[in-house]
Image (cartoon, rainbow, N blue to C red):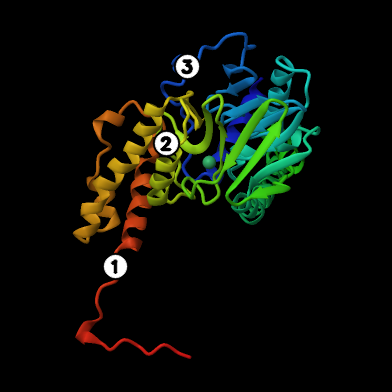
Amino acid sequence: MLERRNELILLVAWVLLLAAAWPAASVPGQEKPVAAAPNSAAPAGLQKIADDIYVRVVSPDGEEVANSGVVILGSGVLLFDSHFTPEAGADLEELIKGVTAQPVRYIVNSHFHADHTHGNQAFGTARQIIGSTLARRDMLQKDAPALNRMQAIAQKQVEQLARELSLESNPGKQEALRLQLKTHQAFMRRLASLRILVPSLTLDDSLTIIDGERELNLLYLGAGHTEGDIVLYLPREKVAFLGDLFFNDALPNVEDASPLEWMDTLREVLKLDAATFVPGHGRIGTRQDVEEFLGYLEDLKALVAPAVKRGESLEQVVNDSRLPAKYDGFGFQNFFPANLQKMYAELKAAQPAAAPRGGAKKKEARP
Ligand SMILES: [Zn+2]
């Protein structure tokens, strides 16, 4: 039991590494009831939001980390995001077996982050992994090297602990080191068995899947949480799965984000004729919840923009800014400094360049 807990701590450390300052804190409000639809006839662990449509809403401090969506089609199941580990993916597959005998045929990865994609390999029945062209690029160029780096770090830690153990003569300390070594070795084995499975079917704008009675739209609505986020939209059921374009009741992770474009993309999201909006993190939301999240980004901009205009330094902005009281109940409060920093960088970059001194002549364009 202790080993399992230690392994989990290592996993959380890994999320920290991948997502900069990911706090291991749950999202308040996650336990609130689903506002959009009743949760009936669903097994424990899945929330039913419409006929044959389920969501696994998870706490961010477990192995799943991010929510997953399940849509039962005519010829199989479509999964929207696969959790953080293959083990969490395998648990999800068991839950899916509780609602349908159909195998998972499609996996959609909303974006490239590990907590939405590393469960992919648990679903051996999947014929296609679908994602945006940019998400595929980022999985290859960012996630795969990050995993290699993590594997090297884990290997070094194991070697270091083995060395310390060989030099230790105190029996009590030897025992503690042996336990630590065992946990790190188990973690290293898990990393070694992890495979980055990238989308084999990619989209730049939209993709429609018609399978049985159901029509699904995968939409790229612009950059936001990353450059390559896509949305799963079910027009008849008025349901939209937004991945990490939507953090419900929580401050967002902006590590790979463009907050200014994110606001535009959310305005596009709000044009969809949908009533139920599923976030990557947090409870299932309504249109009002998405508007509130957009409002947070707008408030963040309003907080930072005047300081950028006045020429204040980033340090000044971070020191002087307070999270508005209405967001006190939001989860991931530790993200606030990073949120300020990202907004500051974007606004600074968007400022018109200062006019050259002495009215320097414009350079002739080269032929
Ligand atoms: Zn993400």
* Point 63% across, 43% down: residue: 207
Amino acid type, residue under disc 2 in the picture:
Leu
Q: Are marks 1 and 3 in contact (CB under 8 Å)?
A: no
Judged left or right of residue 54, residue 159 is: right
| Whether residue 41 is situated above or below residue 175 in the rendered picture | above
* Point 50% across, 46% down: residue: 221
Amino acid type, residue under disc 3 in the picture:
Val
* Point 66% across, 27% down: residue: 214
- Quadrant position of the N terminus in the picture: top right
Give SS at disc 2: loop
Disc 1 to disc 3, how far (Cα)? 45 Å
| Pointer 3 residue | 34
Viewer can see residue 169: no
Amino acid type, residue under disc 1 in the picture:
Pro
Give the mark nearest the N terminus, 2 or 3.
3
Viewer can see residue 311: yes
Residue at the right extreme of this rendering? 125
Choose between 119 and 170: the one closer to the eye.
Answer: 119
**In the rendering, at what x and y percent does residue 216 appear?**
62, 33
**In the rendering, at what x and y percent does residue 315 appear?**
28, 54
Give SS at disc 1: loop
| Pointer 1 residue | 352
CA neighbours of label 1 inside 10 A, class few (<14), some (14 to 19), many (20+) = few
Disc 2 to disc 1, how far (Cα)? 30 Å
Give the mark nearest the N terminus, 1 or 3.
3
Choose between 239 and 262: the one closer to the eye.
Answer: 239
* Point 42% across, 41% down: residue: 266
| Pointer 2 residue | 270
Choose between 129 and 178: the one closer to the eye.
Answer: 129
| Whether residue 162 is situated above or below residue 179 in the rendered picture | below
